[in-house]
Image: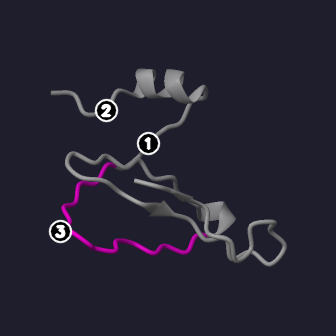
């Protein structure tokens, strides 16, 4: 079974995005995973695949000059 198709993904998002690493992890109910701090020059995107249940993805912008400072945009499960 194919879990990722680069060509189809690029068509859906409307741009070419190259993934260099694919990790798999498993979590239990009510688990908080990952709190990465990223600098612009070394930032990484995440491709999240949920096979069962849901996910709440939250981003916090810590940049002092950013319009989203101290705001927490989230995608509800």
Horizontal and vertical percent position of residue 14: 60, 25
Disc 1: CA contacts within 10 A as few (<14), some (14-19) or many (>=20): few
Q: Disc 2 and disc 3: Cα gap in Å?
A: 23 Å
Residue at 80% in and 78% down = 64
Earlier-in-chain disc, 2 versus 3: 2
| Disc 3: which residue | 28
Provide the secondary structure element on which disc 3 rests. Answer: loop
| Disc 1: which residue | 19
Query: Is 44 situated above or below 13?
Result: below
Tags 1 and 2 in contact by the CB under 8 Å rule?
yes
Quadrant where the image shows the N terminus: top left
Horizontal and vertical percent position of residue 27: 20, 66
Which of the two residues, 48 or 29, is positioned nearer the viewer here?
29
Q: Quadrant of residue 62?
A: bottom right
Query: Is 58 situated above or below 52?
Result: below
Tags 3 and 1 in contact by the CB under 8 Å rule?
no
């Amino acid at each position: 079974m194919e879990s990722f198709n680069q060509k189809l993904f690029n068509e859906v998002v409307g741009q070419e995005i190259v993934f260099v690493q694919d990790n798999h992890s498993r979590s239990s109910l009510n688990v908080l995973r990952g709190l990465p701090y990223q600098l612009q020059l070394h930032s990484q995107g995440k491709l999240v695949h949920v096979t069962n249940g849901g996910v709440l993805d939250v981003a916090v912008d810590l940049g002092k000059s950013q319009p989203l400072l101290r705001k927490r945009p989230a995608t509800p499960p």
